[in-house]
Image (cartoon, grey):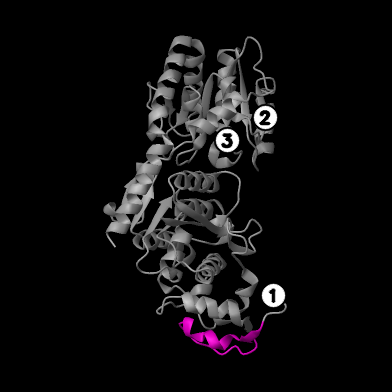
């Protein structure tokens, strides 16, 4: 990751996970994740339960 | 149109899917379209659009959050086996990277494997058609791998075993249409994985004839030995290519006649074992390992018979090249090969693993110059039409336009 990146708590992006868990110690690049979240479909979730639990 | 070609595999890479993508891009661009290519970087550390400078995202930017939020405590099914965990994480890297790059500007997304297909189906705009190409069967290869490696502890019916067929099915169901290169591939999707027949189209690969003939005419320093005919086998030296069957056949052939040599062109993990088999069969003055070479087209002009005794293959370019060079092809009945060679017209087909039949067929073509040359001429005439790149690109564009029209 870019050393100069502005990082924020990963919990800000909990909405893309089926089972939400607080991980305040994990930081992510704010610019990268805002750009990702802006493009993802509204109903996008991880994991992809259809194939990950065959 | 603006088209995205995408794969889970490494790009750039040697051969296979990468060659297909490069040729397709070039020909689509000749028709005035714009084409990007997305995939894993050669070091597997990032996802990138290889032809767009700066369009890349390192996996290390995504791994910590994914590992923490998708840990066993939260998602035990995802962590049921490391095989599932690893493939799924790789897919999520692609999904999030594709969102990062943005897919809004593409008119068509054309994926090249089931993982990229499933991934991009989940993040693309709903209005954008998704067309998938299958270049083999990942699920079949993985199931064979699990059978051959019982130490992995993946038994039939376990989650890791079921994962790959499930991926084949759900990938095909997420597309506008899936394209297979032959009926064999389609039959696997329909018969083994339950994909409805009407979701799979079949048309063969195209072949870049002008580029091939330019290489063919460039020549090679390799010269055929005087008084001998040359049997050529260009292939990666891995088990599935069945070179061990060929060497067994050559051992039988040596007792029938001595007017031939065999050139094996390629490299791979199996080379040492094959060289040992050659020595143990006292074939070291008949069989020559040339390693990987980029003058195979010119070597074909120095050859008389092409042979490919593989255990499984889809639609190998080596057979197309041999046919374009006017060589008769002796091939096994594996995979899509019987759809490439007409027995008795453009070559001869033998059952998979049947070294004795291969030896008999080689003997026949070495004995009968007129028959051998007739098969070769027929093969060339067939190849010039059947493997036309223009035909494949036209069919692809029809698929693209058809998918756009139905939206």
**In the picture, which quadrant includes the N terminus of chain B?**
bottom left
On residue B289, the disc is: 2
- Residue B389 is situated, as x and y percent measured from the top left of the image, at 43, 37
Left or right: where B96 falls relative to B182: right
From this view, report whether residue B368 is shown above or below residue B173.
above
Q: Give me the residue at 59% from left, 39% from top.
A: B236
* The C terminus of chain B sits in image quarter: bottom left
**N-terminal label among 3 and 2:** 3
Question: Which label lies toward us, 3 or 1?
Answer: 1
Quarter of the figure with residue A41: bottom left
Q: Which residue is mark 1?
A: A2
Marks 3 and 2, how far apart in space? 11 Å
Toward the viewer: A20 or B11?
B11
Residue B358: numbered disc: none
Foreground residue among B346 and B405: B405
- Do discs 1 and 2 belong to a common subunit? no
SS class, disc 1: loop
Residue B234, percent across and down? 58, 32
Q: Residue at x 34, y 61 (%)?
A: B173
Foreground of the two, B325 or B115:
B325
Give the vertical position of A41 relative to B352 (above or below): below
Range covered by the magenta-colored residues: A6-26
Residue A52 painted magenta: no
Q: Is residue B69 visible?
A: yes
Q: Nearer the viewer, mark 1 or mark 2?
A: 1
Location of residue B102 with respect to B355 vertically, above or below: below
Q: Which residue is mark 3?
A: B235
Q: Chain of mark 2?
A: B
Badge 3: chain ID? B
Mark pair 3, 1: CA separation: 43 Å
């Amino acid at each position: 990751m870019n050393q100069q990146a502005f990082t924020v708590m990963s919990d800000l992006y909990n909405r893309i996970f089926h089972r939400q868990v607080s991980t305040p110690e994990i930081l992510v690049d704010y610019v990268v994740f805002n750009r990702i979240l802006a493009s993802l479909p509204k109903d996008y979730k991880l994991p992809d339960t259809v194939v990950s639990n065959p | 149109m603006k088209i995205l070609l995408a794969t889970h595999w490494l790009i750039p890479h040697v051969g296979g899917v990468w060659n297909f993508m490069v040729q397709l891009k070039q020909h689509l661009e000749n028709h005035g379209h714009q084409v990007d290519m997305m995939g894993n970087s050669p070091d597997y550390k990032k996802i990138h659009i290889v032809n767009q400078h700066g369009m890349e995202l390192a996996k290390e930017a995504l791994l910590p959050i994914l590992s923490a939020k998708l840990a066993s405590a939260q998602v035990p099914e995802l962590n049921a086996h490391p095989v599932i965990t690893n493939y799924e994480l790789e897919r999520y890297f692609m999904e999030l990277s594709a969102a990062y790059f943005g897919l809004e500007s593409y008119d068509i997304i054309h994926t090249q494997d089931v993982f990229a297909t499933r991934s991009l189906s989940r993040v693309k705009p709903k209005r954008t058609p998704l067309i998938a190409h299958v270049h083999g069967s990942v699920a079949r290869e993985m199931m064979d791998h699990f059978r051959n490696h019982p130490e992995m502890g993946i038994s039939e019916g376990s989650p890791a075993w079921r994962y790959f067929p499930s991926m084949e099915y759900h990938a095909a169901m997420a597309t506008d249409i899936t394209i297979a290169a032959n009926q064999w591939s389609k039959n696997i999707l329909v018969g083994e994985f339950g994909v409805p027949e009407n979701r799979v189209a079949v048309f063969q690969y195209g072949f870049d004839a002008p580029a091939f003939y330019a290489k063919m005419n460039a020549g090679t320093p390799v010269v055929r030995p005087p008084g001998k005919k040359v049997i050529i086998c260009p292939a990666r030296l891995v088990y599935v290519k069945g070179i061990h069957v060929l060497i067994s056949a050559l051992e039988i052939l040596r007792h029938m006649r001595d007017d031939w040599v065999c050139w094996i062109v390629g490299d791979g993990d199996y080379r040492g074992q094959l060289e040992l088999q050659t020595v143990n069969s006292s074939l070291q003055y008949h069989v020559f390992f040339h390693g990987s070479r980029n003058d195979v087209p010119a070597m074909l002009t120095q050859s008389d018979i092409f042979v490919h005794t593989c255990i499984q293959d889809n639609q190998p370019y080596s057979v197309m090249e041999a046919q374009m060079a006017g060589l008769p092809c002796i091939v096994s009945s594996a995979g899509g090969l019987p759809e490439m060679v007409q027995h008795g017209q453009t070559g001869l087909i033998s059952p998979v693993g049947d070294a004795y039949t291969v030896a008999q067929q080689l003997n026949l073509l070495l004995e009968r110059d007129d028959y051998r040359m007739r098969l070769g001429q027929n093969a060339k005439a067939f190849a010039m039409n059947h493997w036309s790149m223009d035909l494949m690109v036209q069919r692809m564009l029809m698929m693209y336009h058809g998918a756009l029209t139905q939206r």
